[in-house]
Image: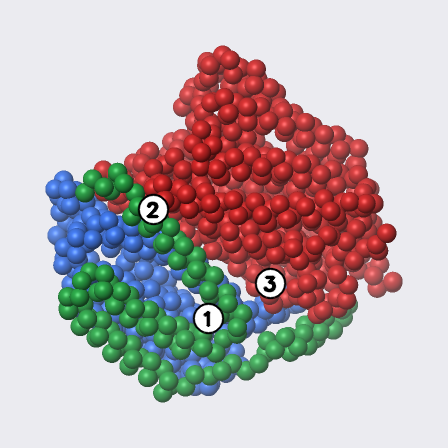
Chain colours: A red, B blue, C green
């Protein structure tokens, strides 16, 4: 006990002071935090863009934005939030922090590569911003050819930026896989890995195997712009649909890069905050891998109206339905875990419940879009926008905030203000549904996405959607405020405030630099709560 | 203090096995990076088969053959380098690393001073005179063939260059006596990378030079 | 504080336990030489085979098959794959499978697509 207190007083990974101790750190916890804070800054930037163009869409006709500015803003909103926020924030941010701790290791397998990966990420982000100097792009985050094929230098630089961000993503994925294979504590068999770790493993596989294809696709797009190689340009014999094939070969699995870590987080939250062993451990673990794999087979469902052959349409539509199986397995297992659990309605639990309900809607509306017939009606309408925001914001961002509050006591040894955190949650939940549910209706009634103007009869729905976005903005600001205030002035947190069983709860808060005094020998599973 | 010391050991914790696994995973990404280009090749070849056949006559089969032999030989010397390290033959290690580097440089020299300049001279590069001519005449497949040729051999050449630089670093470490039969991970791991570069060329050679 | 020391020791023991430290299989020079010679011969064969007209598809299949044999030789011996763990063998099937998917599905699309390429 004495030794323990000594560790608590003298050794925390936060001890070293000064900028240099952060910028050149090899400590996975610090690197994780740097990722997280970088992403949070971009979350605010990307969110701000959304608020601006949503405000423009309050009423039909021009308010204060030109159509061109509107196109630029939604492009940046998408590119920033996807590549700089949702993809890295859970795996590279929280994953970096907790993966080694959860498997009983002192660090990731390659700490230097981990730091390198962060700096490559920053470089990519800066390149993305620098591209603005050459004239902002307005291609949408999907960069569809042939529109994007002869725009010149700005598309070239953006594609290099995304390529760079991809390299960072690949290195992190590689690092995590080796870490999970090689650095597990003795006794920590695959069957005792926390489900967050399983999810990170599946995510890393997708990051590793899908990202290079995006890299080469955007490299070719860049070359198209400066050399005119013609792969995607029909005038030169190329095929714009091929660009979409290659682009979605990454970008569909990328959806799972965004959502799989969120699944992992929810498995943790649901079990710990209802004090029940997770229901169907192996099914959840295996479904993560199944999603990762099936995710590679279904990219064509983004292209049903792109001029793909009917044969390919049918193959991709058929395959897409299979994704519903492992995701439904997860939803079922979470609800079964909650059943008769001792649920404590903490903020993390509220986010988990929010996640499950929103993801259910996001997932089910996905089935509409997987269906060839309905997709032709709904494609490129607000229905699609509503669908993927339910999955990416409703699910991924909710999971992130759930995880953030779940682990704030561990990361900083400080407790957050439960009451205000719940206020933030409520605003997020109401605002989210207010913003995106009307978009389903708009889409079904034929409102195309990415339009700057719309007929008067759509005005009430657009108006509601915009008001909802203000709620989200308030919710996110309050939640982040609560988080920052906790770091600054929060009450001291106990080592294990939630009674969790996985390894991160066995060490002091905030964790010591080397995580463990002694590498633990694991005997119990991460969800061995007493049954009642 | 202990903590930082500990950190230094950490990188070794994953050990040689970990480093090799990491490199293999990285090679997977290389495979899929080229995979995107191979997909483009497959699509355009299947559509423009005739054009591809005609266009490939512009390439010099002898040079392609020589470069294939050069790269295979470099792979062999690299493998011998790893063996030298494993069996603690330090001078041989230096020799084989040097040979590998020289062969890699030879490959690049042939590519950049003999092969590509001819294509540039003939205007067969994207945007070149002959290239644009193909498009105007409706032989778009021939233009795409050369786009693919430059993209694939260019990306491959870039990998050879990176390999040469990495191996030069390894050679410097070897000359300083860093490696022995006890510690040779970096040699083996960078060898893996070098072999992959060879492996990709093994496919590029028939795909561009030996089309029927 | 002498805490890290026993921890470090523990990690060592763990690595022995996981057989991570086993001596690597060392491939000998005669094997490498044989492989290199095989690669040279196969290169000659593939050039020679390209000169015989067996029809576009057969020629392509032959060329790619020979390339695959060569690639396998490089991977198995030069890259020591033959002596690697089952885990790695399993892992390798994943990118190869994905590569196949990446090639196959766009090809299926293009070959069954009327219209755009049909112009030719």
Would residue C71 be visible to someone looking at this image?
A: yes
How many marks can you see? 3
In this orientation, which residue lies closer to the viewer: B143 or A159? Answer: B143
Give the residue displayed 40% in from the left and 30% down from the top. A138
Give the residue displayed 76% in from the left and 45% down from the top. A338
Alpha-carbon span between mark 1 and mark 3? 17 Å
The secondary structure type at the circle numbered 3 is: helix
Q: Badge 1 local density, few (<14 within 10 Å), some, or many (20+)?
A: some
Give the residue displayed 14% in from the left and 59% down from the top. B57
The residue tagged 3 is A179
To which quarter of the image does residue C115 belong? top left
Residue A488 on image: x %, y % = 74, 40
Would residue A514 be visible to someone looking at this image?
A: no
To which quarter of the image does residue B35 belong? bottom left
Residue A33 on image: x %, y % = 64, 48
Residue B32 appears left or right of B153: right
The residue tagged 2 is C109
Using the image, tell me which numbered label, if any, was put on residue B189.
1
Q: Badge 2 local density, few (<14 within 10 Å), some, or many (20+)?
A: many
Q: Are marks 1 and 3 in contact (CB under 8 Å)?
A: no
The secondary structure type at the circle numbered 2 is: helix
Query: Which quadrant: the N terminus of chain A?
Result: bottom right
In this rendering, is residue C81 above or below B27?
A: below
Report the chain holding disc 3: A
Using the image, tell me which numbered label, if any, was put on residue C110.
none
Report the chain holding disc 1: B
Mark 2 or 3, which is nearer the eye? Answer: 2
The verdict on a common chain for dots 2 and 1 is no
In this rendering, is residue A519 above or below A132?
A: below
Q: Are marks 2 and 3 in contact (CB under 8 Å)?
A: no
Residue A234 on image: x %, y % = 25, 39
């Amino acid at each position: 006990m004495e030794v323990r207190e000594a560790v608590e007083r003298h050794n925390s990974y936060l001890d070293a002071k000064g900028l240099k101790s952060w910028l050149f750190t090899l400590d996975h916890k610090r690197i994780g935090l740097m990722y997280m804070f970088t992403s949070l800054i971009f979350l605010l930037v990307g969110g701000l863009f959304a608020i601006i163009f949503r405000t423009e869409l309050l009423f039909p006709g021009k308010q204060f934005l030109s159509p061109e500015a509107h196109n630029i803003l939604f492009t940046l909103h998408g590119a920033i939030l996807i590549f700089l926020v949702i993809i890295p924030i859970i795996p590279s941010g929280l994953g970096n922090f907790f993966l080694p701790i959860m498997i009983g290791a002192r660090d990731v397998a390659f700490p230097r590569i981990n730091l390198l990966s962060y700096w490559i990420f920053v470089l990519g982000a800066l390149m993305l911003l620098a591209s603005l100097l050459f004239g902002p792009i307005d291609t949408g985050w999907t960069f569809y050819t042939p529109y994007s094929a002869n725009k010149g230098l700005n598309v070239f630089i953006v594609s290099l930026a995304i390529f760079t961000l991809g390299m960072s993503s690949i290195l992190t994925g590689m690092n995590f896989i080796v870490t999970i294979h090689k650095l597990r504590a003795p006794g920590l068999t695959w069957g005792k890995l926390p489900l967050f770790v399983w999810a990170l493993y599946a995510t890393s596989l997708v990051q590793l195997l899908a990202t290079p294809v995006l890299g080469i696709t955007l490299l070719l797009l860049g070359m198209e712009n400066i050399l005119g190689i013609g792969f995607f340009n029909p005038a030169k014999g190329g095929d714009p649909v091929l660009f979409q094939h290659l682009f979605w070969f990454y970008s569909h699995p990328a959806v799972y890069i965004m959502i799989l870590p969120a699944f992992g987080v929810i498995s943790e939250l649901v079990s710990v905050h209802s004090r029940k062993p997770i229901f169907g451990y192996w099914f959840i673990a295996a479904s993560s891998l199944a999603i990762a794999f099936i995710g590679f087979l279904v990219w064509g469902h983004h292209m049903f109206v792109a001029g793909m052959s009917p044969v390919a349409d049918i193959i991709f539509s058929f395959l897409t339905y299979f994704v519903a199986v492992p995701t439904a397995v997860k939803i079922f297992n979470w609800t079964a875990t909650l059943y008769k659990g001792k649920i404590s309605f903490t903020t993390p639990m509220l986010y988990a419940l929010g996640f499950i309900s929103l993801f259910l809607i996001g997932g089910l509306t996905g089935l509409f879009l997987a269906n060839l017939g309905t997709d032709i009606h709904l494609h490129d309408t607000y229905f699609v926008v509503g669908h993927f925001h339910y999955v990416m914001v409703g699910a991924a961002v909710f999971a992130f905030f759930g995880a953030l509050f779940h682990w704030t006591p561990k990361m900083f040894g400080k407790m957050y203000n439960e009451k205000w955190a719940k206020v933030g949650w409520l605003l997020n939940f109401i605002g989210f549904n207010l913003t995106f549910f009307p978009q389903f209706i708009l889409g079904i009634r034929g409102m195309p996405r990415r339009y700057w103007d719309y007929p008067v009869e759509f005005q009430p729905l657009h108006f509601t959607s915009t008001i909802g976005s203000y709620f989200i903005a308030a919710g996110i600001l309050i939640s982040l405020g609560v988080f920052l205030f906790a770091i600054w002035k929060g009450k001291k947190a106990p080592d294990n405030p939630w009674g969790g069983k996985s390894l991160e709860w066995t060490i002091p808060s905030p964790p010591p630099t080397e995580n463990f005094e002694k590498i633990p020998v694991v005997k119990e599973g991460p969800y061995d709560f007493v049954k009642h | 203090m202990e903590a930082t010391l500990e950190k230094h050991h950490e990188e070794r914790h994953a050990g040689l096995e970990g480093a090799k696994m990491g490199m293999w995973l990285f090679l997977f990404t290389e495979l899929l990076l080229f995979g995107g280009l191979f997909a483009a090749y497959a699509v355009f070849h299947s559509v423009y088969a005739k054009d591809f056949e005609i266009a490939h006559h512009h390439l010099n089969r002898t040079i392609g053959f020589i470069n294939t032999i050069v790269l295979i030989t470099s792979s062999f010397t690299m493998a011998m380098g790893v063996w030298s390290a494993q069996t603690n033959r330090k001078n041989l290690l230096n020799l084989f690393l040097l040979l590998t580097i020289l062969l890699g440089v030879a490959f690049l020299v042939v590519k950049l001073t003999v092969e590509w300049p001819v294509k540039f001279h003939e205007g067969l590069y994207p945007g070149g005179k002959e290239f644009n001519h193909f498009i105007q005449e409706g032989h778009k497949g021939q233009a795409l063939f050369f786009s693919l040729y430059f993209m694939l051999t260019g990306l491959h050449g870039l990998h050879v260059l990176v390999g040469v630089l990495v191996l030069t670093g390894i050679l410097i470490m070897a000359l300083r006596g860093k490696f022995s039969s006890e510690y040779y991970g970096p040699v083996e791991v960078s060898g893996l990378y070098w072999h992959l570069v060879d492996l990709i060329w093994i496919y590029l050679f028939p795909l561009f030079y030996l089309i029927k | 504080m002498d805490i890290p020391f026993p921890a470090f020791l523990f990690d060592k023991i763990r690595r022995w336990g996981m057989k991570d430290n086993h001596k690597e299989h060392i491939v000998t020079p005669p094997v490498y030489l044989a492989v290199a010679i095989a690669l040279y011969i196969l290169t000659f064969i593939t050039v020679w085979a390209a000169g015989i007209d067996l029809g576009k598809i057969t020629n392509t299949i032959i060329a790619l098959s020979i390339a695959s044999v060569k690639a396998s030789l490089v991977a198995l011996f030069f890259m020591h794959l033959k002596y690697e763990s089952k885990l790695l063998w399993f892992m390798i099937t994943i990118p190869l499978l994905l590569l196949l998917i990446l090639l196959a599905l766009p090809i299926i699309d293009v070959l069954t697509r009327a219209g755009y390429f049909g112009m030719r």
